[in-house]
Image (cartoon, rainbow, N blue to C red):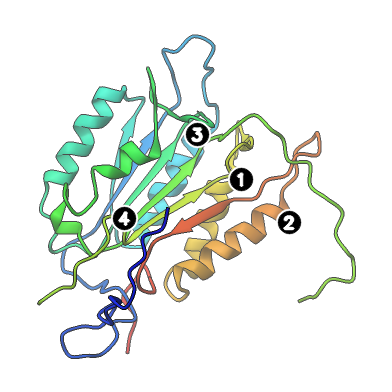
Amino acid sequence: MEEQLGNMWNETDSKNVNGGYQRYYKMDYPEKSVCLILNMEHFDIPGVIRRAGTHTDKKTLKNTFKKLGFQVRIEENLSCTEIENVLQKVTAEDHSQRSCFVCAVLSHGTEDGIFSRDHIFTLNWLVTFFDKNNCKSLAGKPKLFFIQACRGAEYDFGIETDSGSEDRSSAPQLPKEADFLYAYSTPLGYFAWRNSEYGSWFIQSLCKMLQEHGSKLELMQILTRVNHKVALEYESSIGGKEIPCFVSMLTKELYLTPQST
């Protein structure tokens, strides 16, 4: 239920101390930002099979974010407890001289969550480690989560489209969930596709678009191009399609490399 605020609205939203609007995130801090890759290939859970091809996604992500100037860390086949320990160590670090934080999770998943080696966990549990209460040095900075995992068992077989379609400082208080972005390989309820040799459609497309446009396009533009590429250029042998999706709580425009002014 919404709370009625009456006339209590206060125009302090994105103004800085000088009264101007901060349009872009600052991305020229002196230290390299962290890109954490949680790669799950093998599982101890009965009936959960090996994720063949995930090594390709892991390698492509590593190379892509290294080229973008990130410090890449890879953790493989962790239990839930081990993931928790890794996250606690990362959030305990001083990120004050880093621009942002990136986490990529490569695993199986269901509508209920994502698989570690031994249990299922939710994205909400994962990101809570990085909110402004638990990681103050990342407060006000972008925190990006890329999730390659199924979110259900339903297949998307696509639809016919109209062939005539267009070608066609004193910092303000921030909401707890501000400055997060979640990018998923597929909407809730659907199956996500991965090739045992060439990797997943989503991660490979994401990395290609980041490599081509990461130094000049804003992140929302890049993710829209990822959606376009996956939706139009991929189809499984049984006619399966896929459309990634993203949820943004970012409060400024984000360019992953510093932009000249």
Farthest-out residue, right: 163
Residue 56: x %, y % from top left: 50, 39
Q: Which mark is residue 13?
A: none
Find disc 3 in the rendering and name its residue: 54
- Name the residue nearer the viewer: 119 or 202: 119
Closest to the camera, between mark 3 and mark 4, is 4
Mark 4 → mark 1, Cα distance in angstroms: 28 Å
Q: Which residue is mark 1?
A: 201
Q: Which residue is mark 4?
A: 177
Residue at image location 69% in from the left, 33% down from the top: 154
First-in-chain label (3 vs 2) = 3
Amino acid on which disc 4 is placed = Glu
Q: CA distance from mark 1 to mark 3?
A: 11 Å
Q: Are marks 3 and 2 in contact (CB under 8 Å)?
A: no
Cα–Cα gap, marks 2 and 1: 11 Å
Q: Amino acid at mark 2?
A: Leu
Q: Of callouts 4 and 1, which one flags the residue occurring earlier in the amino acid sequence?
A: 4
Q: Residue at x 15, y 39 (%)?
A: 89
- Left/right placement of residue 18 relative to residue 40 reads left
Q: Residue at x 43, y 17 (%)?
A: 43
SS for dot 3: helix
Closest to the observer: 48 or 204?
48
Contact (Cβ within 8 Å) of mark 4 with mark 2? no
Left or right of 196 on screen, residue 17: left
